[in-house]
Image (spheres, grey):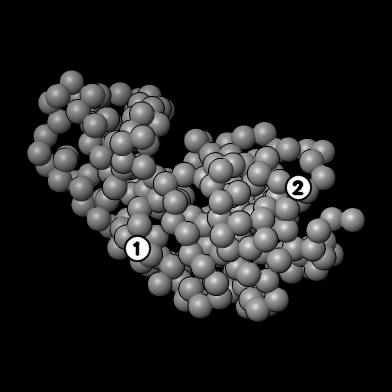
Amino acid sequence: MPAKLTTIGFDADDTLWQNEQFYRLTEERFVSLLGAHGEAAEISGRLLEAEKRNLGFYGFGIKGFTLSMIETAIEVTRGEVSPAVIAEILAAGREMAAHPVETLPHAAETLAALAGAYRLVLITKGDLFDQERKLAQSGLGDYFDAVEIVSDKTVATYRRLFARHGEGPERAMMVGNSLKSDIVPALVAGGWATFVPHELTWAFEHAEEPVGEARFRKLVDLGGLVGLVREIG
């Protein structure tokens, strides 16, 4: 019989609130600014490559994305990007950082139903300031027993956090929209993992679904999570 769940970890961006849509809109604005220097698909591709290169330097989040846009603008214009375009990019980054938080359907009621019966841990990666801002604006902070803002989500991350805030990964579940960050490493760590897809997911976060894994589950939205958790035990 599977060990009873005592701890549930939740991803934040695009699991509890909207996030990727703001990156997509900003990217469209960025591509439009550089439209005279290449095709949209080519510029977007160059931006993605810059983001990947820069993760080890700037981490995940708006600041790294903004710096990657500036780097890409310099590259595609061969160093001739105007100060006005750089100013536009910086303004777009500031607008992203100030955008109001939009919680996703069923987020609040699901957390409310699980709080108290399980240890709830928010496990999110990205810029510390931005993630703290979004959590505060979301109104969801009081449901969590702990908040962990990490540089990345790995097998070691889940083993460490579920040991710190629970009784190990074997009695924990991770819930999120990223197969690469939320699902696969949590399963490898020995925990349960519930995939809640979002219609928009950053290309870097794509991975194959671990079909056949006994502890893997998939839901259409958070509305089915309470029933699933109680079914597991």
Disc nearer the start of the sequence (1/2): 1
- Left or right: where 220 falls relative to 157: right
Foreground residue, 202 or 111? 111
Q: What's the residue type where badge 1 is placed?
A: His
Would you place residue 125 above or below residue 59 in this image?
below
Relative to 19, is 153 above or below?
above
Q: On the image, which quarter does residue 2 sit in?
A: bottom right
Label 2: few (<14), some (14–19) or many (≥20) C-alpha neighbours in 10 Å: many
Looking at the picture, how far across and down is residue 100, in whole percent? 38, 67
Q: Are marks 1 and 2 in contact (CB under 8 Å)?
A: no
Instruction: For label 1, count other residues whose C-alpha is less than 10 Å away and answer few (under 14), some (14-19) or many (20+).
Output: few
* Number of disc labels: 2
Q: Nearer the viewer, mark 1 or mark 2?
A: 2
Picture residue at 80% right of the left edge, 68% below the top: 230
Q: CA distance from mark 1 to mark 2?
A: 33 Å
Check disc 2 and report its element: helix, strand or loop: strand
Instruction: Give the image location of residue 197, x and y in percent.
Output: 64, 50
- Viewer-side residue, 81 vs 129: 129
Residue 141, percent from left and from top: 48, 73
What mark, if any, has residue 119 been given in the picture? none
Question: Residue, x 60% and y 68% (percent of image)?
Answer: 120
Residue 6 vs residue 3: left or right? left
Q: Determine which residue is flagged by label 1.
A: 99
Q: Nearer the viewer, residue 179 or 197?
A: 179
Q: Which mark is residue 216?
A: 2
Q: Is residue 75 above or below residue 176?
A: above
Three-letter amino acid code at the position of disc 2:
Phe
